[in-house]
Image (cartoon, helix red, strand yellow):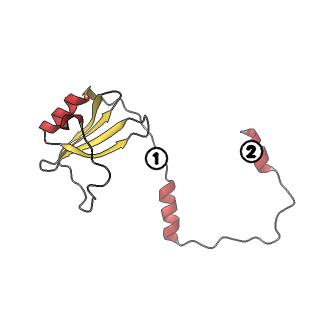
């Protein structure tokens, strides 16, 4: 770290005679930059209890409740697969994280779920679950 500080403090004889100032930015651009660079005041790790079971039982329970997979992704932290299940009629929603081989964990269960009207559906490849065999 000290090496970088020392290197940054070295001076040379290559300073230009004229100083060119950057063009003034409009205030809305400055505001957007500040909003992007805002750091959180505090970061917390919680010990949220998570219920897990074999994926087949999890999927059967979700199907019984009328929920179907809406979105799937890979978790950036540990690389686990995750899915958002939803029952559009009852507006229930569940987030499942697949923590390891054939294990599904309920990370969030919700009610009164709403999806934006302009949400695009049927993008990507269809999902085929083992229960559908």
Residue at left offset 13%, top offset 42%: 66
- Extreme-front residue of the structure: 133
- Residue 81 falls in image quadrant: top left
From this view, report whether residue 105 is shown above or below residue 26.
above
Q: Secondary structure at mark 1?
A: loop
- The residue that appears at 83% across and 70% down in the rendered structure is 17
Q: Quadrant of the C terminus?
A: top left
Mark 2 crowd level (few <14, some 14–19, many ≥20, 10 Å Cα):
few
Q: Is residue 12 above or below residue 102?
A: below
**Residue placed at 23% from the left, 61% from the top?**
117
Residue 101 as seen in the image, left or right of residue 6: left
Q: Which x, y percent locates residue 58? A: 21, 31
Evaluate if marks 2 and 1 touch, with contact meaning CB atoms under 8 Å apart. Answer: no
> Of 113 and 84, which appears nearest the observer?
84
Residue denoted by label 2 = 5
Secondary-structure class at tag 2: helix
Query: How far across and down, in percent of the image, does residue 87 sit?
Result: 16, 46
89 is higher (above) or lower (below) than 102: below
Which residue corresponds to mark 1?
40
Q: Is residue 80 left or right of residue 133?
A: right
Q: Residue 96 location in percent, x, y?
A: 28, 37
Quarter of the picture containing the N terminus is top right
User: Of callouts 2 and 1, which one flags the residue occurring earlier in the amino acid sequence?
Assistant: 2
Residue 50 visible in rendering = no
Q: Name the spot of residue 45 as percent of width and height, x first.
A: 41, 34
Q: Nearer the viewer, residue 9 or 126?
A: 126
Residue 5 vs residue 92, the one in the foreground: 92
Whether residue 100 appears in this view of the structure is yes
The answer for how far apart the CA atoms under marks 2 and 1 are is 27 Å
């Amino acid at each position: 770290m000290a090496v970088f500080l020392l290197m940054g403090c070295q001076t040379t004889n290559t300073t230009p005679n004229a100083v060119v100032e950057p063009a003034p930015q409009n205030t809305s651009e400055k505001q957007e930059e500040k909003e992007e660079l805002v750091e959180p005041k505090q970061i917390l790790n919680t010990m949220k209890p998570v219920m897990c079971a074999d994926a087949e039982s999890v999927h059967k329970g979700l199907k019984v409740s009328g929920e179907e997979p809406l979105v799937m992704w890979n978790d950036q932290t540990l690389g686990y697969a995750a899915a958002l299940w939803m029952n559009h009629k009852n507006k229930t929603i569940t987030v499942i994280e697949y923590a390891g081989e054939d294990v599904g964990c309920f990370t969030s269960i919700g009610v009164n779920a709403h999806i934006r009207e302009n949400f695009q559906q049927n993008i990507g490849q269809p999902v085929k679950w083992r229960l559908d065999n």
